[in-house]
Image (cartoon, grey):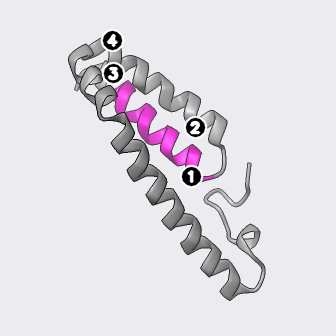
């Protein structure tokens, strides 16, 4: 596998994990590295993604809303709210 692909996919995966574990600014920055690598390696693919970005944002927004709703329901059942749900790594940061 090409090192640029490893950098791209690794950045996207690490960014997603960081984003969903509460480290949003760092997650977005790491994912940005993947986007920059994608843009430099495949400009035509990046242009296609850019054109479909509103659809992706809408789908991502729906997913985040569903996940937040799910976590809220779990928190209510535990009686402590969303803040008491354990996060990967044992802590918020």
Q: Which residue is mark 2?
A: 27
Which residue is nearer to you in this view: 61 or 17? Answer: 61
Q: Which residue is mark 3?
A: 38
Image x and y of residue 43, in percent? 26, 14
Residue bounds of the magenta highlight: 6-21
Q: Which residue is mark 1?
A: 20
Q: Mark 1 near mark 3, Cβ–Cβ under 8 Å?
A: no
Q: Mark 4 near mark 3, Cβ–Cβ under 8 Å?
A: yes
Mark closer to the chain start, 1 or 3: 1
Direction from residue 89 to residue 42 in the image, left or right: left
Where 31 sits versus 86, above or below? above
Q: Which quadrant holds residue 11?
A: top left
Q: Secondary structure at mark 4?
A: helix
**Label of residue 29 in the image:** none
Q: Which residue is mark 4?
A: 40
Q: Secondary structure at mark 3?
A: helix
Q: Mark 1 near mark 2, Cβ–Cβ under 8 Å?
A: yes
């Amino acid at each position: 596998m090409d090192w640029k692909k490893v950098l791209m996919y690794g950045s996207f995966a690490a960014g997603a994990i960081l984003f969903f574990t509460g480290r949003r600014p760092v997650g977005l920055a790491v994912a940005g590295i993947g986007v920059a690598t994608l843009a430099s390696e495949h400009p035509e693919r990046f242009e296609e993604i850019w054109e479909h970005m509103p659809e992706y944002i809408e789908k991502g927004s729906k997913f985040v809303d569903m996940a937040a709703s799910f976590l809220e329901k779990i928190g209510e059942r535990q009686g402590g709210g969303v803040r008491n749900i354990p996060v990967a790594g044992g802590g918020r940061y």
